[in-house]
Each structure stands twice: as structure tokens, then as C-alpha cells.
């Protein structure tokens, strides 16, 4: 598809929107440069992440398609009770004779930090990467229930 046809298709799509002041505002030629469907803008790489918690553990699941364990790093800061997953995706080298019509894949560095509960067991954290999904499990220290009454020795 030529660049001109692409532009015409985008204009037709804009014309089919409901006519209100918001749509008119965003049809401004200056703002069109920031159109979320503009192929010239490559989105920042930020892996989607889920964090869940049970009584026994905290689970962190990050989608990191195409990455290997060598591309990723996991750091735990016990003082601040945080875990940071970071990594880097290299920009694919473009061939000189290749003309791109659409570039949507992200590249660059990322860092995601998760706060951990006070009873996180930092010595037993496990991480696994399989099929582009990083799964980190942070067990919790099992706390003994406190006794409701106790005796005090007299000295």
C-alpha cells in the first residue's frame, strides 16, 4: 500500500467517527503526528505484567516474547522490599533494500518494580522462563500464630 493510500484510508476512518468537538480537535494536523495508529511511532517496550498473591506466595508473570534468560535480570532489594525485573530488546537490523510499511514491534530497555509483603521469603524466590512468559514466585514465611496468653517468669 502506498503512503498516499495509507493516508487516505486514515482520513476515511476519521470521517466515519462521530462528529463532535473531541474528534474535530484530534483531527488537527499537528496532533495527527501523535495518532496512536501512526506507523512512524514505535511504542515503548513495557511487558505486560500480572501480580497476584495468595496466603503462601506472591506470583509475578511477565510477557516477554522473544526474550531469553540472558536478556533478563531480576534484582531484589530486601531493604525496600522490592523486586525489579529488567531487560533489553535489541532493535532488529533493517536491510538497506527493505522498505517497511508497518513497524509495530517494540524494542529498548524496560524495568518493572513490584513491592513485596513484609513476610516475603527472599531466600526461596524462584524464576522460570518458558514460551516468552517469565514466572517469578516469591514464597511467604509462614508465621506461627501468636499465643493469646503466656506466662512471664518472675526474677
Image (cartoon, helix red, strand yellow):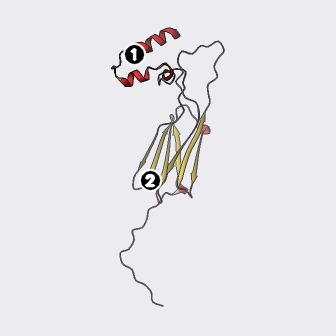
| Residue receiving disc 1 | 13
* Residue that lies at the very extreme toward the bottom in this rendered image: 155
Label whose residue precedes the other's in the sequence (2 or 1):
1
Q: Can residue 54 be seen in the rendering of this structure? A: yes
Q: Which residues are magenta?
A: 140-155
**Residue 73 bears which disc, if any?**
none
In terms of secondary structure, where does tag 2 sit? strand
Q: Residue at x 57, y 16 (%)?
A: 100
| Residue receiving disc 2 | 57
When the figure is inspected, residue 113 is found, relative to residue 98, above or below; the finding is: below
Q: CA distance from mark 2 to mark 1?
A: 47 Å
Between 4 and 104, the one nearer to me in the picture: 4
Between 81 and 39, the one nearer to me in the picture: 39
Q: Is residue 42 magenta?
A: no
Rendering coords of residue 95 (x, y %):
65, 17
Quadrant in the rendering for residue 151: bottom left
In terms of secondary structure, where does tag 1 sit? helix
The chief SS type of the magenta part is loop
Rendering coords of residue 124 (x, y %):
53, 55
Quadrant in the rendering for residue 12: top left
Rendering coords of residue 53 (x, y %):
41, 50
Amino acid at each position: 500500500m502506498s503512503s498516499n493510500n495509507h493516508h487516505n484510508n486514515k482520513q476515511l476512518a476519521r470521517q466515519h467517527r462521530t462528529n463532535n468537538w473531541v474528534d474535530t480537535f484530534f483531527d488537527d494536523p499537528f496532533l495527527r503526528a501523535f495518532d496512536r495508529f501512526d506507523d512512524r511511532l514505535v511504542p515503548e517496550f513495557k511487558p505486560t505484567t500480572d501480580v497476584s498473591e495468595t496466603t503462601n506466595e506472591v506470583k509475578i508473570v511477565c510477557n516477554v516474547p522473544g526474550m531469553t534468560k540472558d536478556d533478563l535480570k531480576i534484582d531484589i532489594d530486601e531493604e525496600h522490599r522490592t523486586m525489579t525485573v529488567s531487560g533489553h530488546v535489541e532493535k532488529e537490523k533493517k536491510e538497506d533494500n527493505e522498505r517497511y510499511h508497518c513497524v509495530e514491534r517494540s524494542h529498548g530497555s524496560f524495568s518493572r518494580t513490584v513491592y513485596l509483603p513484609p513476610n516475603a521469603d527472599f531466600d526461596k524466590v524462584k524464576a522460570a522462563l518458558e514460551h516468552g512468559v517469565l514466572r517469578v514466585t516469591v514464597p511467604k514465611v509462614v508465621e506461627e500464630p501468636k499465643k493469646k496468653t503466656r506466662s512471664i517468669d518472675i526474677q
